[in-house]
Amino acid sequence: MNLSEIIPCLPKARITGPREGELGTVIDDSRFVQTGSIFVAVKGTVFDGHKYIPTAIAGGAAAIVAEEGPIDGFDGTWIQVANSRDALAILADLQAGSPSADLNLIGITGTNGKTTIAFLVHGILKQVRQRAGMIGTIQVDDGVKVTTSTHTTPGAIELQNLLGRMRDNGCHGVAMEVSSHGLEQGRVRGLNFQVGVFTNLTQDHLDYHGTMDNYFAAKKILFSDMAAHSPKGVGVINSDDRYGEELMKDFEGRLKLVSYGFGSNCDFQAGRIKQNAKGMEFQMEAKGKSFLVRLPMIGRFNVLNALAALAAVDAIGVSLRDAVAALKNVTGVPGRLELAGMINGAAVFVDYAHTPDAIQNVCRTLRELNPSRLITVFGCGGSRDRGKRAPMARAAEKDSDFCIVTSDNPRDEDPAAIIADVEKGFVGTAFRSVPDRRQAIRTAIEAAKPTDIILIAGKGHEDYQIFRGERTTFDDRVEVRKAIEVVERLNQKESA
Ligand SMILES: CC(=O)N[C@H]1[C@@H](OP(=O)(O)OP(=O)(O)OC[C@H]2O[C@@H](n3ccc(=O)[nH]c3=O)[C@H](O)[C@@H]2O)O[C@H](CO)[C@@H](O)[C@@H]1O[C@H](C)C(=O)N[C@@H](C)C(=O)N[C@H](CCC(=O)O)C(=O)O
Ligand SMILES: Nc1ncnc2c1ncn2[C@@H]1O[C@H](COP(=O)(O)OP(=O)(O)OP(=O)(O)O)[C@@H](O)[C@H]1O
Ligand SMILES: N[C@H](CCC[C@H](N)C(=O)O)C(=O)O
Ligand SMILES: [Mg+2]
């Protein structure tokens, strides 16, 4: 990029030094600076990038973008801005050639359901329009290659580069999860979203946002940015959710809005749900027509996720008939109500529920399958929202016959202290704590009797456990299969 292209994009910046000249790539991490780089100093949650400016200069940075004034002795270009995160987003977009302008970008936000909706949208688009991109918690698909994600919403540079690859690979649409951290930190600033989906808002991430009001304010950024920059954008909103209802009121007249839910006045409305262990069907009323929707997933909340996906693809011009036809062929989402195995005639499900609302929904869904008993194994993440621990216990015990509390990424906390926080939430006594997750899974599987259901909640697709900054390999689905093998062998020995 040339400085003469960059400078007009930051009209309020104070420039010192050369205003012309070819530069290298934009980077916000001093550890990756190369000769000619444009280093953007960002004040983060852990570090202040401004402290690393000397390292960036020593590494060869030719331009510095910072919220502070120039440091002595630097002969490159100093670009002083009011907000470095905004500048980073603008420069990342410029560097990638504004790819979001050429893509049908569908952003999905809310506490729960983002990954599921992203998979549904992506699954529909791939069938109807061949090439589609996806960005989210589990994986990134650039239209050609699928890779494992590190974040739900990547940082601005990685994100723009990814969108650039999607555009070059001929993706017709992109399903993208937009986290509240991503919105708050400006990772998606300046993107041209055609559609913004809002799923719901319930307690999570209060360690970061502090209050539900701040958390909601972060989610709203997706829609206020759309109202300001994407005049043709459509907000697809779950109006059964009280925060969704508030969003509808807030953005009426500022954004085209489409509501979805079970409520009778929703634009995309679902009813008459029939469910068995393999999937469900329901009747959807939308655009003056009635559709029979079949979905190879279970749970009332997945009806909402399907409605959101259908409303989102409709908003980018996909025929609803084609989308409904495609939906019945989508594959399940890894680690979301995934049937991990059977033991003694009992089904063992792995799910990613890690909030009070999610765990309540999943337990209720499994209870609707009429098991003799529902045994729920779960834990709570360490160094994250502590306030959700006791409510998760309360939510889990409502529809479970027995709960086993265990560890789920204790991070920098003492696993016993996390478990003690969880235990405070139980009203009854039908629980026990087994801190070692492998042992907890084994305990549940040993207890299984025919027609019981066992739920292992919280880690879903994750293939690791984080203890004190160290990641060790751990996958609930693998552990379930191993425990089943051991228990079956023991059963065979006993019966021999
Ligand atoms: C709390 C948080 O969200 N942190 C994220 C954030 O970091 P940050 O901006 O606060 O940066 P920082 O680490 O304080 O550093 C500040 C600046 O100094 C720079 N630096 C730092 C060190 C150095 O030697 N040199 C240097 O230049 C850094 O590159 C950065 O630009 O931005 C970084 C880049 O985008 C992220 O990698 C980082 O994710 C951390 C690792 C993380 O765990 N984030 C989680 C909580 C998260 O973002 N989760 C959401 C999903 C939540 C959900 O499920 O809904 C997600 O979108 O993934
Ligand atoms: N629409 C929904 N409403 C409430 N709970 C849901 C909904 N969809 C999924 N869930 C529950 O929440 C869990 C997480 O779902 P999903 O991964 O789709 O959400 P997410 O928003 O991407 O979460 P994260 O922010 O952690 O990535 C699921 O395993 C399920 O238990
Ligand atoms: N995206 C969620 C993941 C939580 C998953 C759970 N396994 C945990 O580690 O708490 C978060 O960052 O809070
Ligand atoms: Mg997700």
Image (spheres, rainbow, N blue to C red):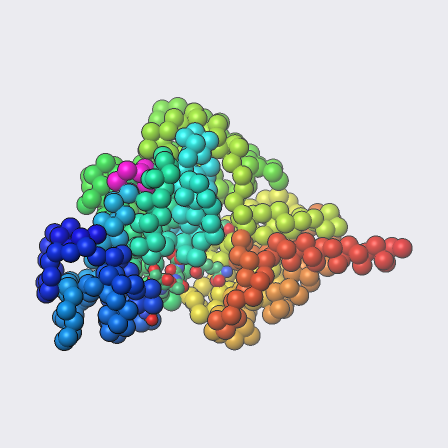
In the depicted structure, whether residue 188 falls above or below residue 262: below
Residue 87, image x, y percentages = 20, 57
- Is 107 a magenta residue? yes
Q: Quadrant of residue 218?
A: bottom left
Tell which of 130 and 331 is nearer to you: 130
Q: Residue at x 10, y 64 (%)?
A: 17
Residue 291, image x, y percentages = 45, 26
In the depicted structure, whether residue 448 falls above or below residue 277: below
Question: What are the residue bounds of the magenta stretch?
Answer: 100-108
Q: Residue at x 56, y 66 (%)?
A: 472
The quarter of the image holding the C terminus is: bottom right
Tell which of 467 and 26 is nearer to you: 26
Q: Quadrant of residue 442?
A: bottom right
In the depicted structure, whether residue 449 falls above or below residue 76: above
Q: Residue at x 16, y 66 (%)?
A: 76
Residue 300, image x, y percentages = 50, 42
- Is 14 a magenta residue? no
Horizontal side of residue 205 vs 273, given as left or right: left
Q: Is residue 418 visible?
A: no
Q: Is residue 325 visible?
A: yes
Residue 62, image x, y percentages = 20, 63
